[in-house]
Amino acid sequence: MNDPVYTVILLLLGTAILIMLLFFTGKARIRRKLGKAPIKKISEFKSGETAKIKGKVKIIGDPVIALLSKRKCAYYHVVVEKKVYNRRNINWKTIINKEFAGTFVIKDGNEYAYIDRGNIKSYIMLDRNYTSGLSKDAHPVLEAYLNSHGYDTKGVFGLNNTFRYKEGILENGESIAVLGKGKWKDAKEAGLPSDYKNILVISQEKGEYVYLSDDPDVVEGTMY
């Protein structure tokens, strides 16, 4: 059918579906939840409250080493996708989606907050991107990472499979926003050095989550 009105309707319908998919994806929900939450200073937080705080990351002890870029960090998120072919389409299939948190606190003025690492949902900006494929061999670091997860860079007839790799981290001193329930505890009770004395521990009840992001729009509260 070549009716231009019909074509416009299809385009509008496709756009609406795409917007809905983006709106309801897990990462979009995290970003939206953090963006809407009111910001509270750590010093104003009362035990039992749920609110958003923001501050700068301070790593405790040894930093985490990001898997692909080998950067020192407090937290990393790695996504690896493989190009897959079928009879009609070419798609990207997520084969690795891994996040890991080290020990860190958030500094806001003279106060600190510690994040319970057991139940985090994050929206980390994926700022490093790599590719490998038919005419581009995977870097040894990327190849070793794929091999460690049971994937081979080579496919049929020894040709390279096509992958794309994305990585995001939380660096020492980086500004982030965190949403969760806070409770003031003695540093030793929270498993931290006694130098931190009384510290706000951000956590949630079983089945709920702590949300965090380094997206500048979320941190600064400018997305709405």
Image (spheres, grey):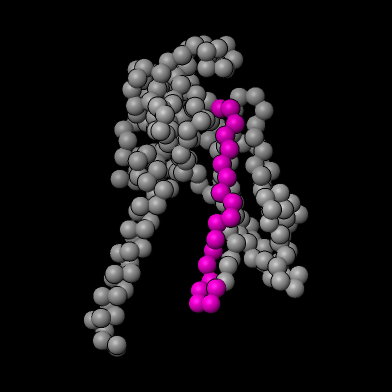
Q: Splitting the image into 4 quarters, where does residue 34 fall?
A: top left
Residue in front for this viewpoint, 77 or 219: 77
- Residue 64: x percent and y percent? 64, 35
In the rendering, at what x and y percent does residue 39 appear?
A: 34, 31
Q: Is residue 152 left or right of residue 187?
A: right
Question: Does 158 sit above or below residue 118?
Answer: below
Is residue 106 something that shows in the picture? Answer: no
Task: From the viewer's side, name the closer residue of 97 and 23.
Answer: 97
| Residue 10 belongs to magenta span | no
Residue for point 58% across, 38% down: 100
Q: Is residue 204 above or below residue 95?
A: above
Report x, y in % for residue 151.
68, 56
Q: Residue 137 placed where, x, y %?
A: 73, 64
- Give the image quarter of residue 172: top right
- In the rendered image, which quarter contains the C terminus? top left
Q: Is residue 156 left or right of residue 16?
A: right
What residue do we see at 52% from left, 25% from top?
105
Magenta stretch: residue 93 in it? yes
Q: How many numbered tags mark residues here?
A: 0
Relative to residue 75, is residue 29 drawn left or right?
left
The extreme bottom residue here reads 2
Helix, strand or loop for the magenta stretch, by majority: strand
Task: Look at the image and give the residue range highlighted in magenta.
Answer: 86-104
Residue 96, can we see it? yes
- Image quarter hosting the N terminus: bottom left
Nearer the observer, 87 or 10 = 87
At x 44%, y 26%, the residue is: 203
118 lies left or right of 207: right
